[in-house]
Image: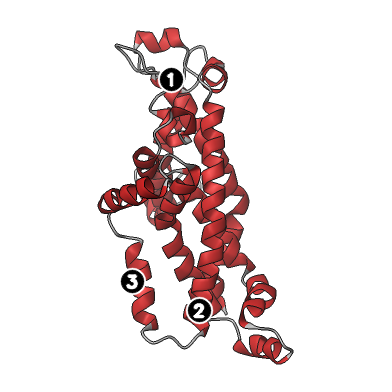
Amino acid sequence: MTALSPGTGAPQASSGRGPLRWIRAHWTAAALTAILVLFLLPFYWVFAHSFESAAQFARNQVTLWPSHPTLSNYYTVLVRDGFTTAILSSLIVASITTAITLVLGSLAGYALSRLRIRGRGVILGFVILAGFFPLTAMMGPLFDVMAHTGLLNTYLGLSISDLVYTLPFTTWLLASLFGQLPAEIEEAAMVDGCGRLRVLVKVVLPLAAPAMATATIFSFILVWSDFAFSLAFLQSSNRFTAPLAIIMLGQSKYQTFYNYTDAAVMITALPILALVLIAQRRIVSGLTSGALR
């Protein structure tokens, strides 16, 4: 018999079906929440243990949050261990690579989208393929080139090597967007006496500002987080970038103090996190602008 609620005569819903009914109605939100927790848990773990004192770390107790959080790890990493030098090195390398990427990517993307080049599709496909080529296969030849040209253990040499990360994506993104822009605007500018290069600088690039911003942000992030090429081409510790310098922190003869390492990881990650949060609308706009035209 169906149970009736007092005073109403209506059937009383089974209490066990409420959560299941909610999950069926909100399964997308539930799945996204689960994925978000899965991805944020490692970040939270590093964040929490970056405030762990040396005494608590020595006890080797697993806790979700330190009992006595402290900022001493950040002070030690930045002041005593000189991690600010590594941050500055990463900033220099990322800035140089991003600048070269935007110049070369703009020229290559415009040429592939506007000039009559035989085999354009093959060239663009090769550019995309180069972005997926194994890095370990490139290190040997690149090391020989750097050694013979005097670029080994220099910021410029590392920046040129990091173009492997950034240039294929930037070229593909800008070539796709430039092809969506109306050619009549460029033709009108050339009728007024502008050459191809001036049209690119004065007309095309301002119209492609969202894509340029997206390429800038992605290039900067890719180079900022590079570890493989930094390990291969930098030899002096005073030139180490942040990802490479992290492995040198907290090292002793018998133990690695991961609370110091976690503090350095947070110092390295927070600028990129802030950049993505601030510019997320610009990133989405740049990636979708070509599809919306």
Counting residues from the start of the chain, the first of labels 3 and 1 encountered is 3
Q: Which mark is residue 111?
A: 2
Q: Is residue 11 visible?
A: no
Q: Is residue 28 above or below residue 256?
A: below
Q: Quadrant of residue 54?
A: top left
| Mark 3 in CB contact with mark 1 (< 8 angstroms) | no
Q: Which mark is residue 126?
A: 3
* Residue carrying label 1: 259
Counting residues from the start of the chain, the first of labels 1 and 2 encountered is 2
Q: Amino acid at mark 2?
A: Ala
Q: Is residue 52 visible?
A: yes
Q: Amino acid at mark 3?
A: Phe
Q: Is residue 117 above or below residue 46?
A: below
User: 72 or 109: nearer the eye?
Assistant: 109
Residue at left 42%, top 29%?
A: 246
Whole-percent x, y for residue 170 in the image: 48, 64
